Amino acid sequence: MNKEGVTYAFYFKETSHTFVEYLLVPGYSSDKCIPNNVSLKTPLVKFKKGEEPKISMNIPMTSAIMQAVSNDKMAIALAKEGGVSFIYGSQSIEEEAAMVSHVKNYKSGFVSSDSNIKPTTTLGEILDLLQKTGHSTMAVTEDGTPTGKLLGIVTSRDYRISRMSLDTKAETFMTPFEKLVYADADTTSLTKANDLIWENKLNMLPLVDKNQRLRYMVFRKDYTDNKEHELELIDENKRYIVGAGINTRDYAERVPALLKAGADVLCIDSSEGFSEWQRITLRYIHEHFGNDVKVGAGNVVDAEGFRFLAEAGADFIKVGIGGGSICITRETKGIGRGQATALIDVCAERDRYYEETGVYIPVCSDGGIVHDYHMTLALAMGADFLMLGRYFSRFDESPTDKVKVNGTYYKEYWGEGSNRARNWQRYDLGGARKLSFEEGVDSYVPYAGPLKDNVNITLAKIRSTMCNCGALTLPELREKAKITLVSATSIVEGGSHDVILKDKFGRN
């Protein structure tokens, strides 16, 4: 306020920075600092000093609450690796609850069929489905659903494209049920199923109920995979942990349905969390369903926003506005803050809040990740875990189509604020129930293959960098990390330069 009593806008003194403007400086590494000794365990929800959080993760990664990222398939794949997916809420309550239920009822190694055909399906249609899913084993059910009466199986060994008409129906060349080796879905353990596979030299064993309805498939190729999930994230009943997105409009109906389906943790999906709507939502959920129901909130970009949501009852708080690869909020509305600066500010406030109250509220960094090393920077700056959209959208397990463009495979990826998603609830300001303008784009991302392979590479980089910093745990990384701002010139210096890369030359 000046001497005439006029109030002016508040100006932050610090320039807003993002991750690409920082580097970690190596610290002393003892002989104990080897990647195999690194623990990436981190809290997902708040806890009091001296107590353990109700839910922790074995890796600091969650998948974003987006139509193009997080469905039940993604949730299962990520839980196997130790993280949590938040199934997208921009769908009907019944559909979201069904996805949650599928994750909670999924038995490791027992796969629900996602390539299903009818006896009347033609060879041409089968080839189209093969192109779409990449799965050559297809269940032939009476009604073409994943749980219909099993009539047979079609694999690539059952047909020859060069000698068969594309109009040929599956019933003429499928392996009929009578010739299949199968097992009872209610009484067969995974160990017994694998024994049957090996004894009968099978690639796949179908499990059916007493009415011959298909329940699961067990694949030979998954045997080794099932032995490798040392970090899988499960509850006390050995079911996978799964999260679910909610909004600030229909929470009174959506939350009980998601809890009944088995959701372990909820998160308010909103572009901006410093809002009375979020306080009302948090208060309602905790008053009606108890404090054992864990609900994350956000997004915020400064200390004031964190304090507001902490006092409103948030169990974790997301940081980031406008930093997502498909987000155009900053250029559309001029709202946001550089992700690194926002994260540093919020994490400092989290630590102050912890000192004052003895309650630790985990911070989730949401957005701004371009390279894998940005994840390590975010964790060093104070994030307890990350929420990733583009990163996970590239994998087989994301719900979008894989498409071929000019000889290269891509996955479709769109923002929740795009016209395609029409998720007006995420941008709700209490007015008309519509999306007045776009805050996200519709795009493609390079296809990257299976989640497991890519996540393991990323985690290997994080563990290695932590060792360079002399840290074996995430709290130790935050304590020991030395971080420096870098100039535009030094960013160029950090990549390959002054050489001609071999892949620039064509080969005869």
Image: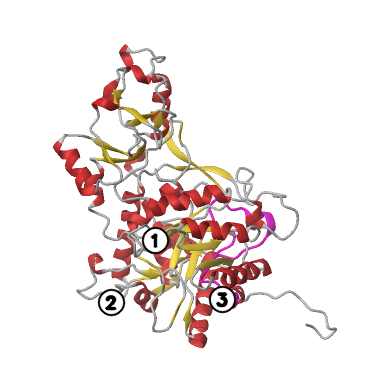
Inter-mark Cα distance, 3 to 2: 36 Å
Graded by Cα atoms within 10 Å as few (under 14), some (14 to 19) or many (20 or more), the crowding at tag 3 reads many
Q: Residue at x 42, y 35 (%)?
A: 408
Q: Residue at x 55, y 72 (%)?
A: 314
The front one of 204 and 8 is 204
Q: Which residues are magenta?
A: 310-338
Q: Is residue 122 magenta?
A: no
Q: How many marks?
A: 3
- Mark before the other along the chain sequence, 3 or 2: 2
Q: Provide the residue designation for mark 3.
A: 310
Point out the residue furthest to the right here: 4
Inter-mark Cα distance, 1 to 3: 29 Å
Indicate the position of residue 323 as horizontal and vertical percent values.
55, 59
The front one of 172 and 83 is 172
Q: Is residue 39 visible?
A: yes
Residue type indicated by callout 3? Ala
Secondary structure under badge 1?
helix
Q: Residue at x 30, y 19 (%)?
A: 159
| Image disc number at residue 163 | none
Residue type indicated by callout 1? Tyr
- Mark before the other along the chain sequence, 1 or 2: 2
On screen, residue 336 above or below 497: below
Q: Provide the residue designation for mark 1.
A: 373
- Closer mark to the observer between disc 1 and disc 3: 3
Indicate the position of residue 342 as horizontal and vertical percent values.
55, 69
- Closer mark to the observer between disc 3 and disc 2: 3
- Mark before the other along the chain sequence, 1 or 3: 3
Inter-mark Cα distance, 1 to 2: 19 Å
On the rendered structure, is 354 left or right of 253? Answer: left
